[in-house]
């Protein structure tokens, strides 16, 4: 789960990491007099908000309120802005980059740092980025030496840097982060180190240990949020064929097969390893509300038995007369039973994957 | 011989009294696996389908001589379950449980490695060696004994491909589902080296997907250390960047982990890459 900038900064402040003084507002009237000038920053999860006009500046309360009125409600990369963060403007001497993330290959937490902050880290040449695994036992002083040499910081800043890196590491571990990124990490003209921007992603699977984030917003569409509540993997894409399959790999392969045959998947819905017909019904209802041109059901029964899926589909179709055409391909455990159940509600299921995919593409009209 | 699971494998099931644990303990036994015990704290002394249940892994190991475990316990208890298994001296630990926090997986995979134990998973379907047995949840019916070794990051997609292989007259030595999470105990490379060393395995099928660089690392390993023919399928060619495609590991991040990059590196290493999952047996027949 991605956190909004203001929430990420609150969290960093709780761990003692210096952040700019600021206040968050969801309505212009909420803005009181604070120290000016300020930056008025849209609180959205999408990147590139500056270019999209989501960051403006103000010299007094009246200006701040009118800038906030312009930004709140603005749509940035499909995401509606609900609040703004007002922040003191820093007197910037240098901009650095610092982050912690999870590395699959080394199965460890990786520290990334660069003297080139304030730009997307992807645009910085690899030889100018420090990438080093943090020992599983915790932050160790050699990392500070590497940071110092990569960033070229003086003694006073290096000391602040070590303190900040230690705190960021503690935050990362304690809050089960997937990513904790500070870009830019600013050195002010008076020599202070401040986290001018903050990106934190919490590991979804660890949210059971962090109930405090449960009410925070996420970058999900309303249907994706509904799916999350019902524990169904659901992703909205651009096309018009709704795909329901079981297992992430099989679902992805199904999308690929549709694409190769000239179709485009609009919604990706993975039943996972459920064997509960009610969950299948819930999934089908979600799919119906996503309004695809055709629903392509591709099941290889194992843990999820084919007849369970068929019963769930039958209940959904009978409950709320679905008008969307359904193409079904059923294979694996109890597929004969499943085909009979689907036949009862007028769905002719095949066992051949490729011909079923072609049929779905034709029904989708592209 | 097969790899990981063979005639000497004696398995316990951690979480045997749960719905999944009970069902799959039975299915493993029906497939020929020696399921010698189960563990559920507080239920020691009882039995599930005649399989004795113990309170601790240590009790189960000392009473039964088990050397492998299959873990079904809920995600929030999984780390402790792996620690317990490693501490009891088990050397093969198959973690079926999904939705385990990354930090937990990092800790238990590292701890297992320090103690010389192999972890398969988490979030995996397990290991099946037809003729010997299986640890995990793969459907028994799709397998036949043969000379193909299979490694996969996926579950049902593996069943699809194994089923197609078996229907085309091929059979398997061992099929290993390594799991779809970013942090897993054994990667393609570890399993490839086992299959390369296994005399019975004559050819290898690799099922990968978008996300991470495990397939690229496998390609490098194959070009240097694998003499057997390797066939592959990569899922997620049509996946857009930044969207997590069901598996926590299946995401194209920072331009890395695309299907194109994986297919290109595998083909460079001499691997035949199938366009459709159902094309794998056909490719293999051509190579025979």
Image (spheres, coloured by chain):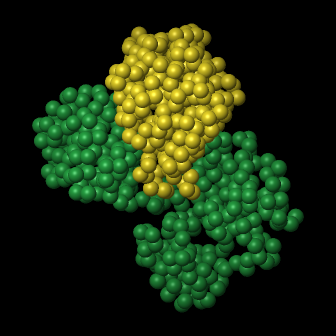
Chain colours: A green, B yellow
User: What residue is drawn where x is 63% and y is 52%?
Assistant: A101
User: What residue is drawn where x is 44% and y is 13%?
Assistant: B131
From this viewpoint, which residue is outermost toward the right? Answer: A155
Quadrant where the image shows the C terminus of chain A? bottom left
Relative height, residue A27 to residue A171 (above, below): below
- Give the quadrant of residue B92: top right
Image mark count: 0
User: What residue is drawn where x is 20% and y is 29%?
Assistant: A337
Relative height, residue B8 to residue B212 (above, below): above
Q: Position of residue B10 (x, y in %)?
A: 53, 13
Residue B104, visible in the rendered structure: no
Q: Position of residue B96 (x, y in %)?
A: 48, 30
Task: Indicate left or right for B267 with A306 as reference.
Answer: right
Please name whichever residue, B102 or A352, is drawn nearer the observer in this view of the structure: A352
Task: Indicate left or right for B40 with A312 as reference.
Answer: right
Task: Indicate left or right for A186 with A157 as reference.
Answer: left
Residue A313, visible in the rendered structure: yes
User: What residue is drawn where x is 82% and y is 60%?
Assistant: A148
Relative height, residue A213 to residue B112 (above, below): below
Please name whichever residue, B140 or B278, is drawn nearer the observer in this view of the structure: B278
Q: Position of residue A65 (x, y in %)?
A: 51, 85
Q: Position of residue A344 (x, y in %)?
A: 11, 37
Please name whichever residue, A266 or A39, is drawn nearer the observer in this view of the structure: A266
């Amino acid at each position: 789960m991605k956190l909004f900038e203001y929430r990420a900064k609150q969290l960093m402040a709780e761990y003692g990491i210096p952040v700019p003084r600021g206040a968050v507002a969801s309505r212009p009237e909420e803005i009181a007099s604070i120290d000016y000038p300020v930056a008025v920053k849209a609180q959205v999860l999408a990147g590139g908000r500056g270019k999209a006009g989501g960051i403006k500046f103000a010299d007094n309360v009246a200006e701040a309120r009118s800038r906030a009125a312009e930004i709140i409600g603005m749509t940035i990369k499909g995401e509606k802005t609900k609040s703004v963060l007002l922040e003191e403007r820093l007197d910037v001497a240098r901009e650095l980059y610092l982050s912690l993330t999870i590395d699959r290959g080394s199965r460890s937490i990786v520290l990334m740092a660069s003297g080139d902050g304030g730009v997307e880290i992807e645009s910085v040449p690899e030889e100018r980025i420090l990438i080093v695994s943090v020992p599983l036992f915790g932050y160790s002083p050699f990392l500070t030496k590497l940071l110092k040499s990569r960033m070229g910081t003086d003694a006073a800043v290096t000391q602040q840097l070590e303190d900040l890196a230690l705190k960021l590491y503690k935050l990362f571990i304690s809050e089960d982060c997937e990513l904790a990124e500070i870009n830019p990490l600013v050195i002010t003209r008076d020599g202070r180190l401040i986290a001018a921007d903050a990106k934190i992603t919490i590991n979804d699977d660890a949210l059971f240990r962090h109930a405090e984030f449960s009410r925070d917003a996420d970058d999900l569409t309303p249907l994706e949020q509904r799916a999350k509540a019902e524990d169904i993997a659901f992703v909205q894409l651009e096309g018009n064929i709704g795909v329901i399959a079981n297992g992430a790999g099989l679902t992805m392969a199904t999308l690929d097969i549709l694409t190769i045959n000239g179709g485009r998947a609009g919604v990706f819905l993975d039943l996972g390893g459920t064997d509960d017909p009610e969950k299948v019904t819930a999934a089908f209802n979600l799919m119906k509300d996503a309004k695809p041109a055709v629903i392509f059901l591709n099941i290889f029964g194992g843990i999820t038995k084919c007849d369970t899926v068929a019963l769930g589909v039958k209940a959904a179709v009978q409950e709320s007369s679905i008008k969307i055409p359904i193409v079904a391909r059923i294979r694996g455990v109890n597929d004969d039973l499943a085909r009979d159940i689907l036949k009862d509600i007028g769905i002719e299921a095949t066992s051949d994957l490729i011909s079923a995919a072609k049929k779905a593409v034709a029904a989708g009209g592209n | 011989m097969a790899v990981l699971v063979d005639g000497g494998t004696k398995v316990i099931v951690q979480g045997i009294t749960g719905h999944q644990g009970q069902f799959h303990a039975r299915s493993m036994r029906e497939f020929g696996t020696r399921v010698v015990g189960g563990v559920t704290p507080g239920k020691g002394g009882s039995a599930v389908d005649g399989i004795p249940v113990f309170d601790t892994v240590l009790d189960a190991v000392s009473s039964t001589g088990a050397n492998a475990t299959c873990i079904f316990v809920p995600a929030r208890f999984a780390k402790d379950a792996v620690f317990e298994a490693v501490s009891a001296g088990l050397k093969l630990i198959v973690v079926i449980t999904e939705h385990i926090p990354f930090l937990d997986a990092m800790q238990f995979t590292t701890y297992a490695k320090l103690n010389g134990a192999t972890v398969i998973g988490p979030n995996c379907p397990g290991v099946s060696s037809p003729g010997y047995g299986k640890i995990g949840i793969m459907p028994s019916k799709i397998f036949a004994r043969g000379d193909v070794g299979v490694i996969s990051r996926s579950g049902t997609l593996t069943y699809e491909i194994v089923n197609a292989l078996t229907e085309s007259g091929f059979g398997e030595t061992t099929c290993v589902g390594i799991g779809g999470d970013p942090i897993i105990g054994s990667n393609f490379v570890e399993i490839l080296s086992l299959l390369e060393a296994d005399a019975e395995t004559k050819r290898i099928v690799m099922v990968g997907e978008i996300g991470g660089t495990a397939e690229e690392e496998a390609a490098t390993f194959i070009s240097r250390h694998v003499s057997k023919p390797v066939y592959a399928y990569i899922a997620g060619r049509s996946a857009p960047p930044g969207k997590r495609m069901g598996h926590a590991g299946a995401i194209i991040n920072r331009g890395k982990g695309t299907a194109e990059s994986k297919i290109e590196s595998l083909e460079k290493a001499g691997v035949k890459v199938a366009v459709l999952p159902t094309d794998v047996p056909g490719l293999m027949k051509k190579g025979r």
